Image: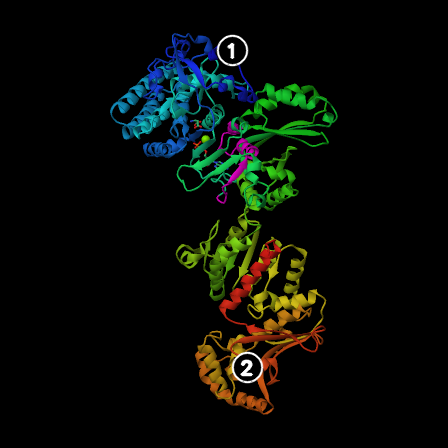
Amino acid sequence: MAFASPISPSYSLHNLSSNPFSKHNKILTLNKIQSFSLSHRHPFFRVDCGSRWQGKDSLNYSLYSSVTSADILLDEAVEKTQFPKGDTWSIHKFGGTCVGTSERIQNVADIIVKDESERKLVVVSAMSKVTDMMYDLIDRAQSRDDSYVTALDAVLEKHKLTALDLLEGDDLANFLSWLHQDISNLKAMLRAIYIAGHATESFSDFVVGHGELWSAQLLSAVVRKNGLDCTCMDTREVLVVNPTSSNQVDPDYLESGRRLEKWYSHNPSNTIVATGFIASTPLNIPTTLKRDGSDFSAAIMGALFRARQVTIWTDVDGVYSADPRKVSEAVILKKLSYQEAWEMSYFGANVLHPRTIIPVMVYDIPIVIRNIFNLSECGTMICRPAGCENENGQRMESPVKGFATIDNLALVNVEGTGMAGVPGTASDIFGAVRDAGANVIMISQASSEHSVCFAVPEKEVNAVAAALESRFRQALDAGRLSQIAVIPNCSILAAVGQKMASTPGVSATLFNALAKANINVRAIAQGCSEYNITVVIKREDCIRALQAVHSRFYLSRTTIAMGIIGPGLIGGTLLDQLRDQAAVLKEKFNIDLRVLGITGSRTMFLSNTGIDLSIWRDLLREKGEKAEMQKFVQCVHGNHSIPNTVLVDCTADSYVASYYHDWLRQGLHVITPNKKANSGPLEQYLKLRALQRQSYTHYFYEATVGAGLPIVSTLQGLLETGDKILRIEGIFSGTLSYIFNNFVGTQAFSEAVKEAKEAGYTEPDPRDDLSGTDVARKVIILARESGLKLELSDIPVQSLVPEPLKASGSAEEFLLQLPQFDEDMAERRQEAEVAGEVLRYVGVVDVVNQKGTVELRRYKKEHPFAQLSGSDNIIAFTTQRYEKQPLIVRGPGAGAEVTAGGVFSDILRLASYLGAPS
Ligand code: ADP
Ligand code: ASP
Ligand code: MG
């Protein structure tokens, strides 16, 4: 007789596969049971659940709550189909938010009906918040607060309204009658708790489990209403668990398996809705699997049913690399090994109850976590790593899969010279901790053995400290122990990943990220399985630490926070170029450029996560705040989750340039087309370059000379490879290039200037171009780059602005008066032409003679400088290697597009210095 086998109190998981019942196809079962029902043993256990919990086709007998084999008396045996254990079953678990409202319950019912599995078991949590409400009832009652009565009414109301929405006719009447009956029982029970001022654990467990009873009844009724035959299971009749000393429960799989077979024989159905969270003790006392235990229920059921898969439906797209509420950039992990999921859940990723893994792991049953509100996402698959790793692309992923944190911890540090080499110290310490009833979450001991430190929940630390002080009183008095210190307000941050075990450098990267975010690590632990590195940090640092380490492993290595100063012509063009190119850079090169701040001289716009560049102009105009450089820099650099920061100065301002030194010193990279810093006072320039060389921060200024043309980098390349620069000569001004390219005798000089202005090639006042100062700044930049120690004032500049017009009036007046001086220029041009030459306005760096000049020169018509068109720049480097034929760089050297392009290419150079792929 199948039921006659003795009950084993608790079986290990390994015994599950040898379940004796699985061999039989047909078994004998009961059609009438005289049960020693739970109702006889426990005054509050429901007595009428037989009829409530059966599907409409189930046998018509009266089954009391739970029946042990010893209680069974056979009256009559009928042949019934054996419980069809195996992979025809899929298990679904719906969390509280999935069944939080009547619409959501309806939605879950639809999913169940549409699921095409041959057989399905649906484990359901209480409607969201209900378990909290039930615990709250107990708290109120035992603290003799009679508001428990109104709080209970709220519970009644919530379920009543839901039922009214979902059910009708007999279904509704039945549910409401059960609900009222339960509520009146609960009222009586809470009254008893109120009078006693105390609730035992089994009283509490009985009360709080009602949330699942009601949600399961509601859901099964709706599934039936939708036309699918469905039975409801009160898992207290099936699941048997043994309480442990650590306020946990261990499932008794063998006994639960037996009860399941028996239950099924009375309720054969291909669709079962079962209560999560609740179970019975071997003595049939109602109990729970503890908070968030419905996941665990589903996993135990998965093992008992030997299901094909357990799907946990919740309100997020799967397991994220970190709690998405704390790290907005967390990503969904498509696959996790059982080990990884276990470690993640253990360390506080509450998407999965920590004990969910073990039952299913034994049978290799995959768990899939899916979002009920987003069915298009396929979720996270938790399975054996071999299966996971075969997937394409899996090997490329980060060795750290996820991060989790535990808050509200305290560290205890036991320290003293008398501890080293004394066997039994650790045992004494942890014996005392055990006596205090505390749970040790992490332990760390350095091999010098001078101290042992461990983390316990904050609320347990006083008891732990007291227990340790009493245990070690003598050692403290004798000075063998110097202190037992408590460090409150700590959190644990854990990095989890199975591949960490074989990847060097993971902890280096982790600690580097913490250091960059200025976070002090108080204790460290890594087990030799290397699946987990745990650090203890200050609680207030926890979220920042989580974001910092997450971004280091999960963001592109070259995620760069950017601040753009000066969103004018060049800055604005740069922002537009970034907007157009950002997606490609991210996708193809893994370069993630985030503009966190844009500031003009009056207004700035800041964002912690990244400005939407498609609307940056609107944001700046409509949502901008008063510009303030310190706040701007603080915001751009203050985002500790982004490892690199660059400030891009697109102004022409000396004031902004005066910040560079400070910024570089703080570790910010600087990129600029602004000539002011490099052509300003020599001493400041030298200081800046010296700092740049000492530090690991970068300062790029390619666009200061020749806009986007590779001039500075070409010069640096020549110098770095050991060439010797003899002379640099070039047409550095796009405006003056344009003017002289068009001043060919067909028009007067003043007309050429006017045309250049009209074509938009000149500054608003053309004198700024004609004065030659801008060219002089470029000459000084190249001279200094070549090693000459020159001031701007050392460069003689031939101004093309006639002396009398230098100070006179507006740009318009200047243009009006300029024709008076055309003759002089026409003569010079004529002379040149006669000699077969052209006029060109050039800058020269004479490295050999250590000087520079800016002047109007004549060049043979065959000379490369004479061949230009438009606003081209041309620069000739004469060097030891390029002595006979200079190295020439030529191309458009002015205009917002090419200048912004030059700045952009410096940004990409920075990204590649920081490790972006080429
Ligand atoms: P349910 O009621 O469905 O069991 P829970 O609230 O217990 O849902 O778990 C889901 C929640 O877990 C999510 O809403 C999310 O905020 C949180 N969570 C914490 N860490 C993670 C993580 N690493 N990945 C996904 N969710 C997480
Ligand atoms: N309802 C229970 C709780 O909130 C169990 C669960 O939902 O997992 O703790
Ligand atoms: Mg949960």
User: Which residue type does callout 1 highlight?
Assistant: Pro
Which label's residue is closer to the chain start, 1 or 2? 1
Query: Which is more toward the observer, 409 or 33?
Result: 33
Q: Which residues are magenta?
A: 328-357
User: How many labels, in total?
Assistant: 2
Q: Is mark 1 within 8 Å of ligand 2?
A: no
The residue lying toward the viewer, choosing from 448 and 583, is: 583
Q: Are marks 1 and 2 in contact (CB under 8 Å)?
A: no
Q: Report which residue position mark 1 lands on.
A: 6
Quarter residue 554 falls in: top right
Q: Is residue 104 visible?
A: yes
Q: In the rendered view, would you say 802 is above or below 158?
A: below
In the rendered image, the residue lying farthest to the bottom is 834
Q: Where's residue 64, x and y in %? A: 38, 13
Where residue 462 sits, quadrant-wise, is top right
Q: Which mark is residue 800?
A: 2
Q: Quadrant of ligand 3?
A: top left
SS assignment at label 1: loop
Q: Disc 2 marks which amino acid?
A: Leu
Q: Is mark 2 within 8 Å of ligand 1?
A: no
Q: Is residue 503 left or right of residue 5?
A: right
Picture quadrant of residue 213: top left
Q: Position of residue 443 (x, y in %)?
A: 63, 29
> Which residue occupies 55% across, 38% down?
388
